[in-house]
Image: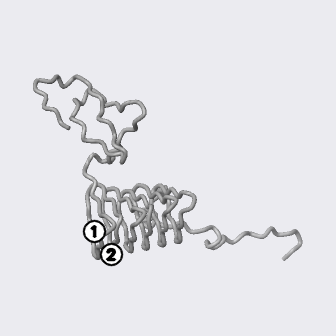
């Protein structure tokens, strides 16, 4: 399967190993940063996590009660009850059943979530998603077929609520006492 090569020039490009029917491809040798690795025609490149870090996976036979914290990417296909928090990306698989408060950078939901979801960046509800709880994110995407029951807060307000509370409130014109208006006097009127 692997061939030992001695004294090979790293600048030389090599074709990618063929993909197996399951879609798995053997790891490719490292290429120098200057040469882009191109997939052969007819094969799609394998997607990598956007953060460049490791992707953690909790399979469908995993059940967790408590707090889950992670740094990069987490894919959950099992059951979690409690709290999930991170600055990374969370993917909730089709088999996942989550009863938790979720606070991460991005969330992609394919499974079922019961609880509030807060994301600093974006939340995506795929067609198979079922979310019961409130959602808060800069960007929210809901595919046709997804079920969402709750309130959503989307976007970033132009002025943060804390700043608005710090500024003195202007009095409405109707609330201010009206200055006494002088009535014109008619000649001959007392």
Q: Residue at x 24, y 41 (%)?
A: 27
- Pointer 2 residue: 82
Give the image quarter of residue 82: bottom left
- Quadrant for the C terminus in the image: bottom right
Q: Is residue 37 left or right of residue 156?
A: left
Q: Position of residue 172 (x, y in %)?
A: 60, 68
Q: Position of residue 117 (x, y in %)?
A: 42, 67
Give the image quarter of residue 69: bottom left
Q: Do tag 1 and tag 2 residues touch (Cβ < 8 Å)?
A: yes
Q: Position of residue 26 (x, y in %)?
A: 26, 41
Question: Which numbered disc, 1 or 2, marks the residue that appears first in the sequence?
Answer: 1
Q: Position of residue 112 (x, y in %)?
A: 44, 69
- Pointer 1 residue: 68
Q: Residue at x 29, y 63 (%)?
A: 58
The answer to which of 145 and 41 lies nearer the viewer is 41
Distance in Å between CA atoms under marks 1 and 2: 8 Å
Q: Residue at x 87, y 74 (%)?
A: 189
Q: Which mark is residue 170?
A: none
- Quadrant for the N terminus in the image: top left
């Amino acid at each position: 399967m692997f061939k030992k090569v001695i004294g090979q020039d790293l600048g030389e490009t090599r074709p990618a190993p063929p993909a197996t029917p399951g879609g798995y491809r053997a790891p490719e040798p490292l290429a120098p940063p200057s040469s882009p690795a191109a997939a052969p025609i007819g094969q799609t490149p394998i997607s990598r996590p956007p953060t460049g870090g490791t992707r953690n996976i909790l399979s469908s036979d995993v059940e967790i009660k408590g707090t889950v914290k992670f740094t990069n990417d987490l894919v959950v296909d099992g059951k979690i009850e409690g709290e999930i928090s991170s600055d990374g990306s969370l993917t909730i698989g089709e088999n996942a059943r989550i009863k938790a408060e979720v606070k991460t950078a991005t969330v992609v939901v394919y499974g079922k979530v019961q609880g509030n979801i807060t994301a600093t960046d974006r939340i995506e509800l795929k067609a198979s998603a079922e979310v019961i709880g409130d959602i808060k994110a800069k960007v929210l995407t809901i595919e046709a077929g997804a079920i969402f029951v709750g309130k959503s807060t989307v976007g970033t307000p132009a002025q943060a609520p804390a700043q608005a509370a710090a500024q003195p409130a202007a009095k409405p014109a109707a609330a201010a006492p009206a200055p006494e208006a002088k009535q014109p006097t008619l000649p001959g009127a007392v």
